[in-house]
Image (tube, rainbow, N blue to C red):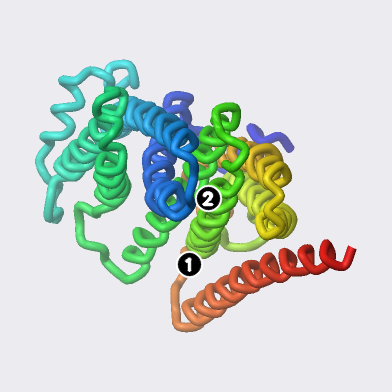
Amino acid sequence: MTLVHLADSAGYAMPPIWRILTKSGYFIGLSAAIGATVTYAAAVRPALRATESERGDAAAMRRRMAGYLAWAGIVLLVAGYFQLAARVARAGKGTPFGDALAPGRIWHFLQAPAAKGAWVAQGTIYLVQNTVLVLASAALIALFVPRVRRHLNTLALTALPLSLAVSLTAAIPATAPKNTDKVLDILFSQAHIIGGTVWVGGLALLAVLAGTRGRLSENAGVLWADLWRRFSLVALVCVGAVLISGLWMSWKHVGSIGQLWTTTYGLFLLLKIVLTLAMVAAGGVNQFWLMPRIAQARRANSTASLLRLTLEHFPKVVWAEVVLGLAVLAVVPFLSGSARSEAGSPPPVANGSIFAVGAVLALTLAASFYATVKTSEALSRREVLAAATA
């Protein structure tokens, strides 16, 4: 049975092309802004300050960082505008997407009065969200100006909370949530979005920054070893947030394992899960194979080996993760509706046992990440001992 036939038989509504492009583009914009600013604050900036990098290496990194952030601001601004137009097209009955792009229609949508029972108009929430989006984009785009780039730290750290607020503000409900499930849906959805955008966006940023290799000195491997180490911890937190929130949302939308291949929603979700696990596997290669060898080269003061591992081998794996991450974002727009509704399954009911199972899974995941870090450290020590014995 083809996907189209399955969609027709199950009543799945395939999203229009403009919906696919605007939603994927919006998440790409969020990844570019949130991922880059969080990674700068948590990995790039501390690595530049902690390591005694040569002045030329630090300057080359900061120039590339400023240029990337400036372009991220443009991507966020453009993606935000098209996403807002898509909201107008979806809100208006039969409004073509081309007409929804008109500023007059968008402004009318943002000024619409609040619905009955709502504490605030939905348009007002989107107005605040897009105001914050413009401010975040402006802070990043300002880095195109050479004289402004010396304020990279200030502008990046200003854009960081604003970029996060773009996603968080849009999640504010216009009506009060009726039960705990609705609140958890919002919280887990935001954890999924922010964790995913930091993960994918951070990988993309570091892959681009690694392109400065030709302008770096032979001692740049020390800087990049510290940078990869710091980002690996950020990535672990993001993976945990994505997996835990993903389990909650999968339980909400999928009634049984079989619905993953008997419903259209389930097939797209299954594809997303496979792509995400492939990203996790690629990260495992970094954690269990490359990071121990980087630690060994750093302890042995092997400049050539450290430079090759950090700026040749590591970025190749990271670029593969970026491609997989973009594929995940391309699948997201197709996750409309739910497998439960397609299969006629009853809605999920959250109870104490569900929360207990979720807590056990979260603790198990945290323990596995702790074991991952300790195993990576043990492998690096074993490599050093093996080298000393040889």
The numbered disc on residue 382 is none
Q: Quadrant of residue 330?
A: top right
* Residue carrying label 1: 348
Image spot of residue 52 (x, y percent): 48, 50
- Inspect this view and state whether residue 287 appears: no
Q: Earlier in the sequence, mark 1 or mark 2?
A: 2
Q: Decide: is 195 above or below 92.
A: below
The amino acid type, in three-letter code, at marker 1 is Pro
Q: Residue at x 28, y 17 (%)?
A: 99
Q: Nearer the viewer, mark 1 or mark 2?
A: 2
> Pointer 1: residues within 10 angstroms few (<14), some, or many (20+)?
few
Q: Quadrant of residue 259?
A: bottom right
Q: Secondary structure at mark 1?
A: loop
* Residue carrying label 2: 227
Q: Taking 141 as reference, is 283 left or right? A: right
Q: Secondary structure at mark 2?
A: helix
Image spot of residue 33 (x, y percent): 37, 39
Q: Residue at x 53, y 55 (%)?
A: 235
The C terminus is located in which quarter?
bottom right
Q: Taking 307 as reference, is 340 left or right? A: left
- Inspect this view and state whether residue 303 appears: yes
Q: Decide: is 150 above or below 280.
A: above
The amino acid type, in three-letter code, at marker 2 is Leu
Q: Nearer the viewer, residue 389 or 90?
A: 389
Q: Nearer the viewer, residue 344 or 111?
A: 111
Image spot of residue 5 (x, y percent): 66, 34
